[in-house]
Amino acid sequence: MPLFDLFTARGEVPGFLLSARPDMGAALAEIGACPPSRIRADLLAVFAGEPAAQWVRELAGGCPRARAALLAALNAAYRTLVEARWREIESAVQSDLAQRGHVLLRMGLAEVLSTLPGAVRHREQILEVDSPVERLLTVEGGLRFAPSLLMTHPVVLPAAPGDVPTVVYPAAPAPVRSSKTSQDVLSVVLGASRAEVLRAAVQPRGTTELAQYAGVSLSSASEHATALRNAGLIMTARAGRKVRHTATALGMSLVAACDPGQIRPAAASGSVELLSTLPDPARRVSAGRVR
């Protein structure tokens, strides 16, 4: 089944295929449960006045075999295009999040928006996104920005009930490191001991535990924890006389970008689409070709 039959000449795809679910299994389940009336309406809206392949017409007509074949084709494409390149995709996405997270912490939301690809522009209370689909959304609870290594242009995913709209934008590919080198990139960036302390803080630990994990003295662990906290890479919570150090989202992203495949931040649930929701960056999202 040629999945590209679902793309129009403008690069538009039916809305029922645009899912913000955190993993492929959930996305396939959502498509599988989509009402036939929604599938038909979305296909008619996309292919209005344009010819469609025979199997696409059968899908619009509610043919169960066509839907089953679509789900099988989507799953096969995922296994070939995404799963086989997961480490590369994860590394690129975590690198993108680490860079933009640093900008957000140091310079604020407006500067983060200015670092997005040129097809995403922010002026006053409107976020403009060049997209094949003309759409105007009113944003109340915020926006989610999701980097993707597979997209060539931004796409706006409307919000599901109780959620917020998602702007998926192309992530810059992470630098490819040769598998033949044993260079510890995180140690080059932070220094060997400080890198180990940050790695230790991927899980909440006390200062003594940081020292044991990193193989340094208690005073050195405390010194490194202070430096990492001042840099926004870890946070420290105190309960009585005990403290717990935990890597921040930025710290997690830095470890993941330098050590691809070593960790998966809990918030990501294995998904490259999920990132922190930025509250109220704009009141409206204008998705479409900006005139």
Image (cartoon, rainbow, N blue to C red):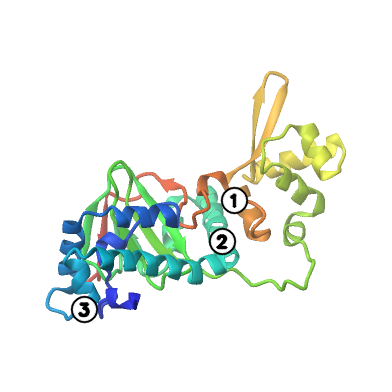
Residue extending farthest left: 49
In the image, is 219 to the left or to the right of 190? right
- Tag in front: 2 or 3: 3
The mark nearer the N terminus, 3 or 1, is: 3
- Tag in front: 3 or 1: 3
| Element marked by disc 3 | helix
Q: Position of residue 177 (x, y in %)?
A: 69, 71
* Separation of residues labelled 2 and 3 (CA atoms): 36 Å
Q: Quadrant of the N terminus?
A: bottom left
* Separation of residues labelled 3 and 1 (CA atoms): 42 Å
Identify residue for label 2.
Answer: 90
In the rendered structure, which amino acid carries the disc numbered 1? Arg
What is the number of callouts on the image?
Answer: 3
Identify residue for label 1.
Answer: 264
The answer to whether residue 110 shows anywhere in this view is no
The quadrant in which residue 128 appears is: bottom left
